[in-house]
Amino acid sequence: MEKLIITAAICGAEVTKAQNPAVPYTVEEIVREAKSAYDAGAAIVHLHVRRDDGTPTQDRERFRECIDAIKAVIPDVILIPSTGGAVGMSAEERLQPTELFPEMATLDCGTCNFGDEIFDNTMPMMRIFGNRMMENRIKPEYECFEMGHLDTILTMAKKGEVPGAPMQFNFVLGVPGCTPATVGNLDWMVRQIPAGSTWTVTGIGRHAFTMAAAGIVMGGNVRVGFEDNLYLSRGVLARSNGELVGKVVRLARELGREIASPAEARKILNL
Ligand code: KMH
Ligand code: ZN
């Protein structure tokens, strides 16, 4: 098995300091959380940014400021800025970080329920996102919240509407209203992807570490972080993203998987 790539989703767009005081908003807090995750073993940081008051934003200059500040401290980390942003943002608003030519960015693979809300990713929108990533030579991480998202994106890749092989998928399981976080569902998704693809699993909330364990033993990769889960264990808030990553590292070591450095992750992901 390849070494395990750990992604830290350090911030997200929805979680707040009221839920966990360590959720980062300011540039300094975002750098602190990125470094804590990196020091604990994350090769990738999935990045959302906020205004200082915590409001989610896709503002290109705020992304630039955060990316530059993170790279000044941990220059080799792989950054995957979000093009999902927050529910309700327009496609143009969401696409702003692609103007900074990151090596990767997320591409969300279909419309879905998102708790009480609807996360809009129509196929025309996805074509625009796919085109932008092809033009700017950005490798997408395909975010699949639903089983049907996988069929959608594979069909679009076959038609050349979004970047094709080798594809990197992130199966985000357990969002309320989307595909539940079970090993059976994960196994089904993994069996659909083309040979040569890479994949990551993200379990939302209490599913974070059960899905991490499944990803470790199934030969995939793992994402954890405040975007997905605020707790280290039942009732115990994580004090940093590094604590969440550290728990994945311990699970991986117990289960016999080594951890990939950013350089090793770049090779595995064909960056
Ligand atoms: N904030 C969610 C609505 C992504 O980063 O591409 C979407 C999201 C996905 O976080
Ligand atoms: Zn995200």
Image: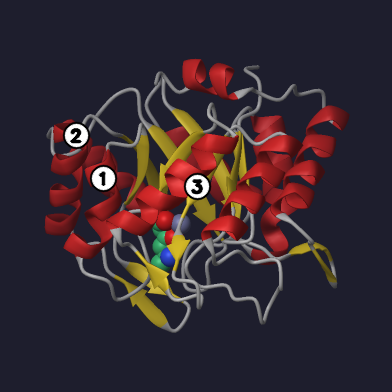
Disc 2 to disc 3: CB gap under 8 Å? no
Q: Which mark is residue 46?
A: 3
**Looking at the picture, how far across and down is residue 149, in whole percent?**
34, 52
Using the numbered discs, state the Cα–Cα distance from disc 1 to disc 2 in whole angstroms.
7 Å
Residue 146 visible to an observer of this rendering: no
Q: Looking at the image, is 71 positioned above or below residue 143?
A: above
**Where does the N terminus fall, quadrant-wise?**
top right
Q: Secondary structure at mark 1?
A: helix
Q: Nearer the viewer, residue 125 or 246?
A: 246
Q: Quadrant of ligand 1?
A: bottom left
**Looking at the picture, how far across and down is residue 62, in whole percent?**
37, 58
Residue drawn 64% across the image and 48% down it? 183
Q: Label 2 is placed on what type of residue?
A: Asn
**Looking at the picture, how far across and down is residue 116, in whole percent?**
44, 84
Q: Which residue is mark 1?
A: 98
Q: Which mark is residue 67?
A: none
Q: Which residue is mark 2?
A: 136
Q: Label 3 is placed on what type of residue?
A: His
Q: Nearer the viewer, residue 155 or 38?
A: 38
- Mark 3 CB within 8 Å of ligand 2: yes
Disc 1 to disc 2: CB gap under 8 Å? yes
Q: Secondary structure at mark 2?
A: loop
Q: Horizontally, is 142 left or right of 131 in the view? A: right
Using the numbered discs, state the Cα–Cα distance from disc 2 to disc 3 in whole angstroms.
19 Å
Q: Looking at the image, is 1 positioned above or below residue 102?
A: above
| Neighbour tally class for label 3: few under 14, some 14-19, many 20 plus, Cα within 10 Å | many
Residue drawn 30% across the image and 24% down it? 165
Q: Looking at the image, is 230 positioned above or below residue 252?
A: below
Residue drawn 70% across the image and 53% down it? 241
Q: Horizontally, is 257 left or right of 174 in the view? A: right
| Neighbour tally class for label 2: few under 14, some 14-19, many 20 plus, Cα within 10 Å | some
